[in-house]
Image (cartoon, coloured by chain):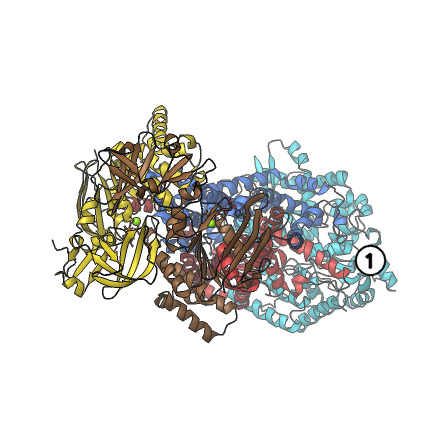
Chain colours: A cyan, B blue, C red, D yellow, E brown
Amino acid sequence: ETLTIATVNNGDMIRMQKLTDDFTSKNPDIQLQWVTLEENVLRERVTTDIATKGGQYDVLTIGNYEVPIWAKQGWLLELNDLGSNYEVDDLLPAIRGGLSVDDKLYAAPFYGESAMTIYRTDLLEKAGMKMPEEPTWEFIGEAARKITDRATGVNGICLRGKAGWGENMAFITALANSFGARWFDEQWKPQFDQPEWKEALQFYVDLMKDAGPQGASANGFNENLTLFQQGKCGMWMDATSAGSFVSNPKDSTVADKVAYTVFPSKGELKNHGNWLWSWNLAVPASSQKADAAKKFISWATDKAYTELVASKEGWANVPPGTRTSLYKNDEYLKAAAFASTTLAAMDAADITKPTVKPVPYTGGQFVAIPEFQGIGTTVGQLFSAVIAGQSTVDDALAQAQSITTREMTRAGYIK
Amino acid sequence: MARAVTTQRKVFFTVASWAVALLIFFPILYTVITSLKSETEAIQGFGLIPSFTFENYVLVQTQNGYFKPFMNSVVISVGSTLIALLIAVPAAWAMAFSPTKRTKDILMWMLSTKMMPAVGVLVPMYLIFRDTALLDTRLGLTVVLTMINLPIVVWMLYTYFREIPGEILEAARMDGASLWNEIVHVLTPMAVPGIASTMLLNIILAWNEAFWSIRLSAANAAPLTAFIASFSSPQGLFWAKLSAASTLAIAPILVMGWFSQRQLVRGLTFGAVK
Amino acid sequence: MATRNTSTLARFMMAPAVGLLLIWMIVPLAMTLWYSFQNYNLLNPINRSWAGFENYYYFYTDPAFWQSIANTMTIVLGVLAITVIGGILLAILIDQPMFGQGFVRILVISPFFVMPPVAALIWKNMIMHPSYGVFADMARWLGFQPVDWFGQYPLFSIVIIVAWQWLPFATLILLTALQSLDGEQKEAAEMDGAGVLSRFIHLTLPHLARSITVVILIQTIFLLAVYAEILVTTNGGPGFASTNLAFLIYRTALLSYDVGGASAGGVIAVILANIVAFFLMRTVGKNLDR
Amino acid sequence: MGMIELKGVHKSFGGTNVIPKVDLAIQNGEFVVFVGPSGCGKSTLLRLIAGLEDTTSGHITIDGRDVTGEPPAKRGLAMVFQSYALYPHMSVYKNIAFPLKMAGIDPAEIDRKVKAAAATLNLTSYLERRPGQLSGGQRQRVAIGRAIVRQPKAFLFDEPLSNLDASLRGTMRLEISELHHQLKTTMIYVTHDQVEAMTMADKIVVLNAGNIEQVGSPMELYRNPRNLFVAGFIGSPRMNLISGKAAEEHGATTIGIRPEHVSISKTGGTWSGTVGVAEHLGSDTFLHVHTDGVGTITVRTGGEIGLDHGAKVWLTPQPDKLHRFDKEGLAIA
Amino acid sequence: MGMIELKGVHKSFGGTNVIPKVDLAIQNGEFVVFVGPSGCGKSTLLRLIAGLEDTTSGHITIDGRDVTGEPPAKRGLAMVFQSYALYPHMSVYKNIAFPLKMAGIDPAEIDRKVKAAAATLNLTSYLERRPGQLSGGQRQRVAIGRAIVRQPKAFLFDEPLSNLDASLRGTMRLEISELHHQLKTTMIYVTHDQVEAMTMADKIVVLNAGNIEQVGSPMELYRNPRNLFVAGFIGSPRMNLISGKAAEEHGATTIGIRPEHVSISKTGGTWSGTVGVAEHLGSDTFLHVHTDGVGTITVRTGGEIGLDHGAKVWLTPQPDKLHRFDKEGLAIA
Ligand SMILES: Nc1ncnc2c1ncn2[C@@H]1O[C@H](COP(=O)(O)OP(=O)(O)OP(=O)(O)O)[C@@H](O)[C@H]1O
Ligand SMILES: Nc1ncnc2c1ncn2[C@@H]1O[C@H](COP(=O)(O)OP(=O)(O)OP(=O)(O)O)[C@@H](O)[C@H]1O
Ligand SMILES: [Mg+2]
Ligand SMILES: [Mg+2]
């Protein structure tokens, strides 16, 4: 039996590919075949296939955005029997919640992440500032501007600017959440015409202008990571999974000068953005090889896999953010300085109540409706244009409002 | 016009042409150079002399496996070109040697089918492929690329055939050759330069086709375009790895192109030169 | 040549090519047409219903629609201008006597062999990257602030990349044409007292006219469909600054998974392409008959 | 073995009537030349016989068998084309062998026949060359070789020499004539060069706008052209045609006199005039005399005449060589 | 106004010596024809004069001025090419006007001159056509028009008629001769067709392998060829050349006799033989007689001779028309 596994080209997944010998030696009757694609290409491939029931894949790598939507369509197989030693209850509650519909698990988390603040202790010190335990955006803004030294190529802050619902909109939505803004009101009316959005976006644009890197409108997670590793950023608010990369001395020139704290909040709101993301493995409902697929998923996401990675690559490189037990593991905590911050952020993220005001949707840095990919990316384009200096905050918000209204009307949310 | 070419003039044009040519070639050259650097070296700023490490190639190979997508690319591009030729030769023969008032229109209509936006018909195509069990098969991709390139193949062959004097085919007919013999023994050998050029161009076009070949393949039939799609933006430093993967993806066709450029260039006129 | 026998045979010989292309065109087109009147979102397959012209309405009123058409034209015309003018100059340059002509030709032809996504990746990451690209390095070396190409000049950057890919094609076709210029004509013009420039304008350019039309026709076919370069580099942005029609449909189909909308876009694109084709074919058809 | 008959053959392309209606019988072993101005339908007629075009109506028989509907390969004819139509990718040997190979003859037999044909045509030392490596005359010979090797019922030639230069044309003309004497196969030869027609034909067919104007031996046509068209077409330089008063004197609308039948004198004669261009060919001189009253008359004189541009001369036609034509252009007996 | 002199002109391409050393003077108003076999350097010599090639050494003067180093445009010559070299995308009018436009002449003046040239050449009704819409003869006339419109010091023609068919060639030959009479401009005309050379030239230059074999008027060359090469080249059909015993009888290595200087008889004569092919031209008949002892001899007889293939005949050369050549091939006076 050959399993075709669709996966993204992220470091953790690639590591998993390298370890397949372990799985095949335990399951000699199962062969593995990998389809590794860039995230966006993967998503469109997999979506087309599952929606048309093409049946090309036996195991899918999908985000927690897709899981509930697809599960509701009946496209995913329920993962009820992942083996005796799977320990479902060990999964982080926030993550598990995001992958369940009606308390039934439809995907197994491979790694999870929330957002945090990563910063350079040396630069902050040089600027004469000290990172508070729970920083506010006001503080971040001030510090970023102070750190910025364009002559030496040091930018106070690096934030995502590259258009895409999973790129700049993930960050901007989290930022907006922390400013108290929301995507939709209870009647699914878009809220870009509200002052919270204007405030958040204005803050972001000004900050990037004053303290951001050149060409920020093209920077996504990877680009910022590179910048940070090269010592070109003072601070960086992004996914917690960045921790293992920036602290890895092999790739990072600043590994010994990084520290972590929670995602900033705005004034008194104490909302840290509610970012929650996980890459998960799932099985299409139509799969002919469900048992083998489940076997594989169980292998790739259980505790033993974590230990396997640790034994081969060290504890700092194990896939984070899925199991409570990991954060109780002393070796891990010792190896990963970002562990506690990560756990705190993940525990704090509440995707059912992402912002201050009530919302009709779930999701932190995204809105868990099928239409969000299109809308989010379009709005992301508009905001990215502001960063590129091609548009203004007001124009972008006005356009975002009208486009979103249009699409939501079309999709039937707004009656 | 055979007046003496002064050496000065020749040197001047040599320098100028080489400069321009190198400029045009530079992105490719720099990619190859970068692929031989280590990751940290790759982003250290402009540098033409790499440390000649092959670690990126090793990494790319272990991560994705180069051989299978390479073979898929070869099979699909060569296969689709051959099938397209097989269908196009008779059609071009008919158009060139037995033209009707509508020949030109048919030709132009064929070309216009290429103007259909591929993505607009993706879902229908996907469904058709699913129902015919062609998804992720080399055969399926070969069929698609055959159809995509068929108009260009017909057109190119038509323009070559038109340059072959009809009298020669008539001579063959007088000599008692059947249609089959006429095409196999007379027409095809005479059009060899044109057919070679058509073949090369279409192998290139098929090799580089990046929409259908990614969308309709998964693991078994994925060609090099899909291979490169797994490197476009991974996490962490990737410039050198990307360069290595890019080099691997384009090297076969580039080398083939270099070696056969004479044949390719000779026929690359689309009937524009009499 | 034209006996009843052979013309009947000719029909038979054309049948496979014509038939297959007809199927290849009609079947998807019919399905596209059908879907374009459906409310059909891939992610919500249960909610399929008849939509009438709603998809068309929404596609047409998409805020990016008109800009995408303008961008499509800009890309096509920009690339054509660069490749045709550059191709002529380059062809003339390469045609001069020099050492290592074969090698120069090999270098110049090379970009044509590079697959579009790779070309875009190379330009995006190696050449035009605002931090690590060669241009940025050069700018810093010269003491300028590096330019954020894809942020500031997205469409221009894409035109450059696409033009780089197609320049060899144009150059080669024009070079062959150039070399086919009758030597006696050049000499006659020389005898007639025409200088280098006059000969170029009155002799070379008109001689190249056919080839130029061919270059325009073929490139237009491919340029109307440019999307991979956009997808890799700018994703159509910032804003809609580099969204062309093909990419807009792409976005509709594979980001919003709006099959109905994308189909409507496809139908619109087919209509527009056919308008372009009609004019192109007429001029080219005329030119090729000459 | 080579009797070809055309009965009421008519051909039109789309709307245009290229061959209105032709009846013609060609005997076995005859060398028949079709002449006529460009576009008169010579090639079309030949191609109808070959089977490369369909007749619109009428019948073609070869040796009594109706072949009207048959494809070219079945008619047992061989054709030599103006452009030679050699297969450029085959050696001379293979070119000549091709028709035999297509007929499925066995290789040893083919070899024998090809060698024999090559010997006849002096091609033996070129058998391994490609057509591109041959001179024009040699190519033409290969084309003929390809035709004779099949021992066809008849040969069809469509202006086979028009791509050669003058002196080669002369040589090849002789060679083809010799070949005809040798093989005695029916040959149909299309040309618009009347020298070729005159020197080679047993029978000339003069065509004009698809119609046969006259059929006859070269000397018949030269001596007794049936009408003005034939008179003007046959003979080189052309017959001088004079209408008006001078013609009426002879009871005709037009009279014709060949250049060689006009005598010239410095002292007196029928028509006076001044010498225009004088073409000295060494052996002969052609004088173009601008006369007072009957236009420019071409006169052939001996090689050593001492007359130059501008000289005043008198011309006298030989009365027994005068041709007279009526209003319709038909010869008056 | 059109005197061209070549002094010690030498040309080699790379290593090959195409023109060893040529001295030649062309007088104003002369019609000079270069003839010679293919590849003998005719075109090269013409192109040296035109300035389209550089001389390797030696000097070229036009009207006494040394133009050796000057570019073609400055020499004031006009050239008509074999392929016509018309500009295919320009109308006839524009083709003819092109040299004037390049010379910066004002449009009204251009218009006048173009119309005048067109009138001279009977092109007035074709002025708006493209070259592609013209017949071969018309194209040739346009090429000439483009040349005469500049009123050059001399015209250079490189085989201008070789792409035309026989009858058109005859007509155009006359037209060019008439034009020369009319304009009285120096003309240099390259051909390998000796009929053209004979009929058009004031002076023929016979070239062989880059060397001048003989210069003289057509009749001079016809009557007194300086050597075997010229003897064989001038005259059509070619002079019969006989060596061996028959020649020794006349005290020469080779003797030559032209076909028109051999008389034929059925009863007796110097040489006996059988008639091979007989070419009937109407006015003349050329008999190819296979003699016993002196090879095949071509004989010209009147049009009405009754001899046919295979007939037994006797030939007698006219003794005063015999040409004698020595071992080196030079004529014996
Ligand atoms: N395939 C065709 N379609 C239409 N008209 C044709 C076709 N072939 C020939 N014709 C016309 O038929 C007439 C006779 O043509 P044909 O080639 O037989 O002339 P020809 O006597 O051989 O002339 P030439 O001496 O120039 O070869 C011409 O007017 C020509 O335009
Ligand atoms: N550009 C050149 N390079 C080398 N050799 C040349 C060149 N041009 C001509 N030749 C050689 O010089 C010789 C004379 O050539 P030229 O063209 O003058 O002959 P020609 O008398 O005009 O012959 P034809 O009657 O065939 O036109 C030939 O042997 C030819 O091969
Ligand atoms: Mg013809
Ligand atoms: Mg020449």
- Residue A91 in view (yes/no): yes
Residue B228 position in % (x across, y down): 62, 47
Residue D280 position in % (x across, y down): 35, 53
Seen in the image, is A386 located left or right of residue E83?
A: right
Residue placed furthest toward the bottom:
E108
Chain of residue at mark 1: A
Q: Is residue E61 above or below residue B54?
A: below
Residue A79 position in % (x across, y down): 60, 44
Seen in the image, is B214 located left or right of residue A262?
A: left
Q: Secondary structure at mark 1?
A: strand
Residue placed furthest toward the top:
D108
Query: Depth check: A77 or D218 in front?
Result: D218
Q: Residues within 10 Å of mark 1 (few under 14, many from 20)?
A: many
Q: Amino acid at mark 1?
A: Arg
Q: Name the residue that disc number 1 marks.
A: A120
Residue C38 position in % (x across, y down): 44, 59
Query: Depth check: C131 or A390 in front?
Result: C131
Query: Depth check: D93 or B174 in front?
Result: D93
The image quadrant that residue B179 belongs to is top left
Seen in the image, is A120 located left or right of residue C245?
A: right
